[in-house]
Image: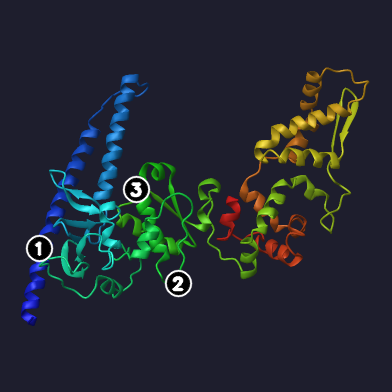
Amino acid sequence: MTAQHTTTTVEHELAIEQAHVDMVYRRLAEATRSAQQVASEGRSLFQSDRTRFVREEDGTGLYERDVFAFQSAKRLATLDAEHEGLVFGRLDRTDDEVRYVGRIGVRDDDYEPLVIDWRARAAEPFYRATPADPMEVVRRRVLRCQGARVVGIEDDLLDDEHDSDLVVVGEGALMAALSRARGHTMKDIVATIQAEQDEAIRAPWQGVTIISGGPGTGKTVAALHRAAYLLYSHRRRFENGGVLVVGPSSVFMNYIERVLPSLGEDSVTLRPISAVAGDVVAISGERIDSTAAAAVKGSLKMTLVLRRLVNEPLMGELGRGDSGRGDAQTPQLRLSVKGEVLTLAADRLMEIRRSVLRSHKVNSGRPAAEAALLSALWSTKPDELDLERDLFDELVTDTAAWKMFCHAWWPPLAAPGVLARLADPRLAAHVGEPILSAAECQVLADSYRPGRDWSVADGALLDE
């Protein structure tokens, strides 16, 4: 075959694929105009000049209007996404059917598929078919596009025994993709997914799927494609429940943020590890801990330390001597009811606290703690104090001593405030040893010195 004939053949094949891609983009433009019209109709669906109250029938109209607006906006977001190579694949099957594979599904006026979404079952042979198992595919073609223009084609002949006059051109789609220069954002691999990657991407959703491999082997991008696949194949379950992608840093999240939108998905939340708890504690740390501090904070032993820290009463800090464990000023509950002094010692208070925390979290356990305190005080009531239980409880809870003690002994806690307490080396040693060594407790306290902002590792601790 002469060079001129080869060039003519490639140009002819490019023209065929360009004609189909043009048809897809025309249909996409029509779908966009239709979605815009639906959005406009939705906005005019319900109009009212009421400002103070809404009748029941008006509420129905408002709901329908909002549904129109939401669905049309969602569709427009999908259609307007920056699709680098909307159509990237073609399958020529043994039954002479031709299937085009792309980032999103597009149909013609008769609802026949012009492009099959890459996540659909019908597109699976594009990634799984091999010469050993062609899956009824004769030729697999990858289209390389710049915007809406087809600039190259790469073919794989999978079933050379099938009687076909299909043309095969190109040097291999994977090598062409690997030769592309890296940019400042991660590229998707939707056009060049290999069979092993596709197996991980399409694995059953139940349970945990672990994607492992050496540096640079595409673990992250394969996991992102899996998220897109799960949203496509089990949308009701995963979109309603939410999909969270967690990465090591903000720089990393900025690098990967365009992958999922390019695959037609914009309903995923991306967070660096330091901001996972940001919706709850409204903070996010960017500081990098020292190696020693990061090792301590990343250890599973920290879950035990945090539990002890949360359960440690704030009043306990007032009674620590230089050793961190002094008992000379350990708090106690002492109040007067009708001239009779009632007292609960520190060991009884700690016993009550431990009992309550066995079945309650700290913030939700205060009512149970107060009830246990009242029962303990009632058991110490002298016989001379002749009162019914209801009156006794009312007299106790009305005293200033009771209110001040409960607020100090069992205050409402917030995660940042609790974690910041570790800046006190004595408290860090008290809740850390013997779970952590003395050196590790000191490293932990140093990492929370006053004036220091939160670190990346603190995000996970705050969430815990």
Q: Disc 3 and disc 2: Cα gap in Å?
A: 29 Å
Q: Are marks 2 and 1 in contact (CB under 8 Å)?
A: no
Q: Residues within 10 Å of mark 2 (few under 14, many from 20)?
A: few
Quarter where residue 158 is shown: bottom left
| Residue 256 in view of the camera | no
Q: Are marks 3 and 2 in contact (CB under 8 Å)?
A: no
Q: Give the labeled residue for mark 3.
A: 233
68, above or below 99, in the image:
above
Q: Disc 2 and disc 1: Cα gap in Å?
A: 40 Å
Label whose residue precedes the other's in the sequence (3 or 2): 2
Which colouring convention does the figure follow?
rainbow
Quarter where residue 374 is shown: top right
- The residue positioned 32% from the left and 24% from the top of the image is 60
Q: Give the labeled residue for mark 1.
A: 16
Q: Give the labeled residue for mark 2.
A: 215
Q: Which residue is more in the foreground, 365 or 189?
A: 189
Q: Secondary structure at mark 3?
A: helix
Q: What type is the residue that disc 2 sits on?
A: Pro
Q: What type is the residue that disc 1 sits on?
A: Ile
**As drawn, is 278 to the left or to the right of 333?**
left
